[in-house]
C-alpha cells in the first residue's frame, strides 16, 4: 500500500468510526482529522468533503463486500442453490453491517437513495463483479444463455428491496429468507404435480 493509500485508509477508518458514533448528518471533518491524526486540509486532499467521504466509504465497503461474497459464489452445487445462498448471504451481510444499518435506521433519506435513485453506481460495480462470473458459468454450460446484465439487475432489485424495505413475510432468520427466495424463484414455474 502506498503512502497516499495508507493516508486515505486512515481517513476512511476514522470517518467510519465517527459516522457510527455521530451519524451521517453530523459535521465531522475536524473529528475525522483528529481521530486520523491528520490536519483538516489533509482530510480534504485525500478524500474530499463530507459527501465525498460517505461515497468513498460506500465504495470501500462494496469492495469488501465483493471479497466476502466470492467464496459463496464459488461453492460447488447446483446453480439454483448457489443463487439462493448468494442472496441469503448478501442480505445477511447487509443486515449485519453496522454502518449501513445505522444509516438505514437513523438517516434513511441519505442512505436509501444509494439503493434506489443512485443505484446505477452500485449496479455498475455489481455488473463489473458478477457479469464475468455469469459469463464463465454460461461458457462452462452451468448456466443457460442469458443477458448477464439483466440477471444482475434482477438480483440487485430483489436484494436491495430485502435490505431496505420492511415486509410482512418474516425474513430475519436466514432459513425464513431462504424460503422466501426459493418461493420467489418458484413463481410461474409449474411443479410436476400441476403439469398436465
Image (spheres, helix red, strand yellow):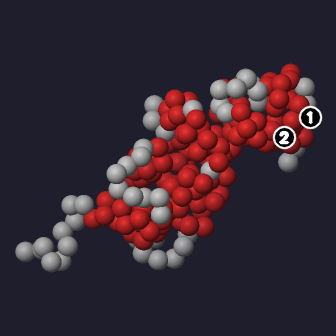
Q: What residue is shown at x 76% (from left), y 30% (from top)?
A: 47
Residue 76 against residue 176 in the figure, above or below: below
Q: Are marks 2 and 1 in contact (CB under 8 Å)?
A: yes
| 10 Å crowding of disc 1: few (<14), some (14-19), many (20+) | some
Quarter of the view holding residue 51? top right
Q: Kindly report which numbered mark, 2 or 1, lies closer to the viewer in this rendering.
A: 1
| 10 Å crowding of disc 2: few (<14), some (14-19), many (20+) | some
Rounded to the nearest angstrom, the CA distance separating label 2 from label 1 is: 9 Å
Q: Nearer the viewer, residue 63 or 32?
A: 32
Residue 3 against residue 193 in the figure, above or below: above
Q: Secondary structure at mark 1?
A: loop
Asked whether, in this view, residue 128 is left or right of residue 171, the answer is right
Q: What residue is shown at x 68% (from left), y 44% (from top)?
A: 60
Q: What residue is shown at x 76% (from left), y 41% (from top)?
A: 17
Q: Quadrant of the C terminus?
A: bottom left
For the question of whether residue 129 can be seen, the reply is no
Asked whether, in this view, residue 115 is left or right of residue 68, the answer is left
Q: What residue is shown at x 65% (from left), y 58% (from top)?
A: 67
Sequence-first tag of 2 and 1? 2
Indicate the position of residue 161 as horizontal and vertical percent values.
42, 46
Indicate the position of residue 71 as horizontal and vertical percent values.
60, 67
Indicate the position of residue 23 as horizontal and vertical percent values.
67, 33
Residue 110 against residue 2 in the figure, above or below: above
Asked whether, in this view, residue 134 is left or right of residue 195, the answer is right
Residue 47 against residue 3 in the figure, above or below: above
Quarter of the view holding residue 34? top right
For the question of whether residue 74 can be seen, the reply is yes
| Number of the label disc, if any, that sits on residue 21 | none
User: Which residue was labeled with disc 1?
Assistant: 37
User: Which residue was labeled with disc 2?
Assistant: 10
Amino acid at each position: 500500500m502506498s503512502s497516499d493509500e495508507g493516508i486515505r485508509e486512515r481517513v476512511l477508518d476514522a470517518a467510519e468510526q465517527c459516522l457510527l458514533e455521530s451519524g451521517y448528518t453530523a459535521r465531522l471533518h475536524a473529528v475525522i482529522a483528529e481521530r486520523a491524526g491528520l490536519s483538516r486540509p489533509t482530510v480534504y486532499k485525500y478524500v474530499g468533503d463530507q459527501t465525498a467521504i460517505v461515497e468513498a466509504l460506500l465504495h470501500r465497503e462494496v469492495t469488501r463486500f465483493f471479497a466476502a461474497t466470492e467464496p459463496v459464489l464459488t461453492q460447488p452445487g447446483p446453480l439454483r442453490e448457489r443463487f439462493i445462498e448468494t442472496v441469503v448471504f448478501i442480505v445477511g451481510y447487509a443486515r449485519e453491517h453496522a454502518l449501513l444499518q445505522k444509516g438505514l435506521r437513523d438517516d434513511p433519506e441519505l442512505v436509501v437513495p444509494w439503493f434506489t435513485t443512485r443505484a446505477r453506481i452500485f449496479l455498475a460495480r455489481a455488473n463489473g463483479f458478477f457479469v464475468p462470473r455469469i459469463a464463465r458459468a454460461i461458457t462452462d454450460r452451468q448456466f443457460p444463455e442469458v443477458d448477464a446484465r439483466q440477471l444482475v439487475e434482477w438480483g440487485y432489485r430483489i436484494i436491495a428491496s430485502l435490505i431496505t424495505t420492511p415486509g410482512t413475510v418474516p425474513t430475519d432468520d436466514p432459513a425464513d429468507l431462504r424460503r422466501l427466495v426459493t418461493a420467489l424463484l418458484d413463481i410461474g414455474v409449474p411443479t410436476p404435480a400441476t403439469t398436465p
